[in-house]
Image (tube, rainbow, N blue to C red):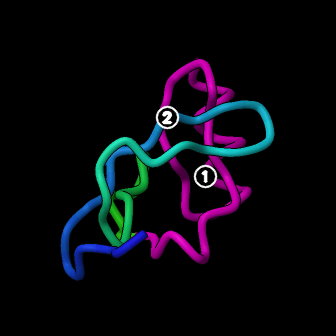
Amino acid sequence: MLMAQGKPARLHFMANAFRVLSPGDHVVCGMSGERIPLEDLRYWSVARQEAYSSAALSTEAERKG
């Protein structure tokens, strides 16, 4: 699949994977607003359908509920 450079991807997050709904080369962290290249994406919330740039930010988001 061709990635649109500089464009955010739209993803559907699942328990152990994500599905690309709209191609792009990054997503935005739900806590920090930081751009996360898709190849570096490791943390997300299935319930909130948002990505996180680090385990610490993922944990912080979980605590906030």
Question: How many residues crowd around disc 1 within 10 Å: few (fewer than 14), some, or many (20 or more)?
Answer: some
Q: Position of residue 36 (x, y in %)?
A: 45, 70
Q: Are marks 1 and 2 in contact (CB under 8 Å)?
A: no
Question: Where is 59 relative to 24, above or below?
Answer: above
Left-right relation of 44 to 27: right
Instruction: Please tell me whether mark 1 or mark 2 is closer to you in this view.
Output: 2
- Front in this rendered view, residue 34 or 13: 13
* Circle 1 residue: 57
- Front in this rendered view, residue 48 or 6: 6
- Residue 15 placement: quadrant: top right
Give the CA separation, mark 1 to mark 2: 19 Å
Q: Residue at x 67, y 27 (%)?
A: 63
Q: Residue at x 33, y 74 (%)?
A: 3
Q: Residue at x 38, y 59 (%)?
A: 27
Label 1 amino acid? Leu
Q: Position of residue 45 (x, y in %)?
A: 62, 33
Left-right relation of 28 to 58: left
* Circle 2 residue: 12
Q: Residue furthest bottom?
A: 5
Left-right relation of 47 to 49: right
Magenta stretch: residue 53 in it?
yes
The image quadrant where one finds the N terminus is: bottom left
Whichever of labels 1 and 2 marks the residue nearer the N terminus, that label is 2
Label 2 amino acid? His
Q: Which residues are magenta?
A: 36-65
Question: Where is 53 relative to 58, above or below?
Answer: below
Q: SS class of the residue under badge 1?
A: helix
